[in-house]
Amino acid sequence: TIVAESANLLMLPGRAPEGDETWNQLAAAMAKEAMVAKAAAQEKNRERLFEAGASLYQSCVACHDKYIPK
């Protein structure tokens, strides 16, 4: 839940670069994947959690690739 809420914080007004819709799309994807991972953990489904964790990681990487200076 904390990761999903962090993504929600990223979508607050003034956080996204002006005129950049990709920021909010990537943050929303992070929130969605975080909730999938939470559900898998609550179900104690190791395989699903592993897959959800990989998807969550990829949502983070997609944003970092675009917004963290290299």
Image: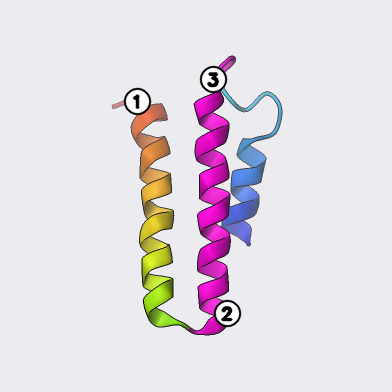
Q: Which mark is residue 15?
A: none
The quadrant where residue 67 appears: top left
SS category of the residue bearing label 3: loop
Residue at mark 2 = 42
Q: Quadrant of the C terminus?
A: top left
Q: Position of residue 32 (x, y in %)?
A: 56, 53
- Identity of the residue furthest to the left in this view: 70
* Viewer-closest of 51 and 68: 51
Q: Magenta stretch?
A: 17-44
The quadrant where residue 53 appears: bottom left
Density class for disc 3 (Cα within 10 Å; few <14, some 14-19, many ≥20) is few
Residue found 37% across the figure and 67% down from its top: 51
Q: Is residue 8 left or right of residue 50?
A: right
Question: Could you tell me what secondary structure mostly forms the magenta stretch?
Answer: helix
Type of amino acid at the residue the image marks with label 3: Asp
Decide which of tag 2 and tag 1 comes sooner along the chain.
2
Density class for disc 2 (Cα within 10 Å; few <14, some 14-19, many ≥20) is few
The image shows a total of numbered marks equal to 3
Nearer the camera: disc 1 or disc 3: 3
CA gap between label 2 and label 3 equals: 35 Å
Residue found 65% across the figure and 44% down from its top: 8
Residue at mark 1 = 69
Indicate whether residue 38 is drawn in magenta: yes
Decide which of tag 2 and tag 3 comes sooner along the chain.
3
Q: Position of residue 69 (x, y in %)?
A: 34, 25
Type of amino acid at the residue the image marks with label 1: Pro
Q: Position of residue 18 (x, y in %)?
A: 59, 15
Q: Which mark is residue 20?
A: 3
CA gap between label 2 and label 1 equals: 36 Å
